Image (cartoon, rainbow, N blue to C red):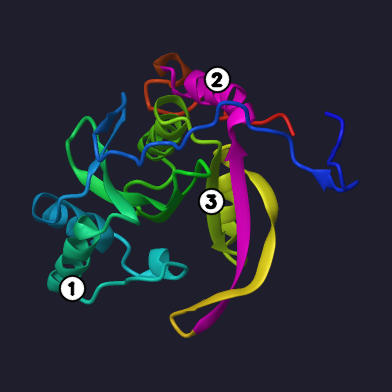
């Protein structure tokens, strides 16, 4: 696309024809084959989440999170009650569709309907959820909801630049690296340089096809092992 120049000789962005503000995400269940992503309910999900998070015996899943590890069930209950009441971040629980057990949570945050920009974050995946079909489908369901149902233009993923597993996950899930913001924030008394990733609406259809091919039941053997890996981008 040729660069546009205004009457003052300045370069300007292209028009976004017909743009209207996106709706805020409604807290509705997102139901898949392996995962259900449902509005967080502190009372209903506390026992399952407490048991799931207890399988992380070292607490290392919380290293790069602004919250956790939780000292006991009461501490987790307090956090979950606050999360349930929050509208930004907007929290969802990730549930195993087969067993009905809650195994982790995630949220939409930094919700900007006027610009069509939203972030996925506060992702807490217990060891029971990590590297499973449930986790991948949960991320797919949240992304599909934003692009297919709500019409957003940009979907973001941010993490501590030192968090190698999170950056690897972002790329696997189809996000493109946008850059690093040094000294972006402080959490748990530590500096955080923040790595930014995004998916744009123009790339969504190709990424979506990659997810759907991977999530097809025919892509898994009797032991639930993948036959072909998830491919969301060609670059």
Q: Residue 8 location in percent, x, y?
A: 87, 48
Of labels 3 and 2, earlier in sequence is: 3
Q: Are marks 3 and 2 in contact (CB under 8 Å)?
A: no
In three-dimensional space, the C-alpha distance between marks 1 and 3, rounded to whole angstroms, equals 27 Å
Residue neighbourhood size for the residue with mark 1, other residues' Cα within 10 Å, grouped as few (<14), some (14–19), many (≥20): few
The disc placed on residue 75 is 1
What residue do we see at 55% from left, 36% from top? 153
Residue neighbourhood size for the residue with mark 2, other residues' Cα within 10 Å, grouped as few (<14), some (14–19), many (≥20): few
Q: Residue 25 location in percent, x, y?
A: 34, 40
Q: What stretch is highlighted in magenta?
A: 190-216
| Residue furthest left as drawn | 43
Image quarter (top left, top right, bottom left or bottom right) of the C terminus: top right
SS assignment at label 3: strand
What residue do we see at 18% from left, 35% from top? 99
In three-dimensional space, the C-alpha distance between marks 3 and 2, rounded to whole angstroms, equals 20 Å
In magenta stretch: residue 192: yes
Q: In this view, does 185 lie to the left or right of 88?
A: right
- The label nearer to you, 3 versus 2, is 3
Q: Is there any visible trace of residue 11 in the rendered image?
A: yes
In magenta stretch: residue 97: no
What residue do we see at 54% from left, 31% from top? 19
The disc placed on residue 209 is 2
Q: Is residue 11 above or below residue 73?
A: above
């Amino acid at each position: 696309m040729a660069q546009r120049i205004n009457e003052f000789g300045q370069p300007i962005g292209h028009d976004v024809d017909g743009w209207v503000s996106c709706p805020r995400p409604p807290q509705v269940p997102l139901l898949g084959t392996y995962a259900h992503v449902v509005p967080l309910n502190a009372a209903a999900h506390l026992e399952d989440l407490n048991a799931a998070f207890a399988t992380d015996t070292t607490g290392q899943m919380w290293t790069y999170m602004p919250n956790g590890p939780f000292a006991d069930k009461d501490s987790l209950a307090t956090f979950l009650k606050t999360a349930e009441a929050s509208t930004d971040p907007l929290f969802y629980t990730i549930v195993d569709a087969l067993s009905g057990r809650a195994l982790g949570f995630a949220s939409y945050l930094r919700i900007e309907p006027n610009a069509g920009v939203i972030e996925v974050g506060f992702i807490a995946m217990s060891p029971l959820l990590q590297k499973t079909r449930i986790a991948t489908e949960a991320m797919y369901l949240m992304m599909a909801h934003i692009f297919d149902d709500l019409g957003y233009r940009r979907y973001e993923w941010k993490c501590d630049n030192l968090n190698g597993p999170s950056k690897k996950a972002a790329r696997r899930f189809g996000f493109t690296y946008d850059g690093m913001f040094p000294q972006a924030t402080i959490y748990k008394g530590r500096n955080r340089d923040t790595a930014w990733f995004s998916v744009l609406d123009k790339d969504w259809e190709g990424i979506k096809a990659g997810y759907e091919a991977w999530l097809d039941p025919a892509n898994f053997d009797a032991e639930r092992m993948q036959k072909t890996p998830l491919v969301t981008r060609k670059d």
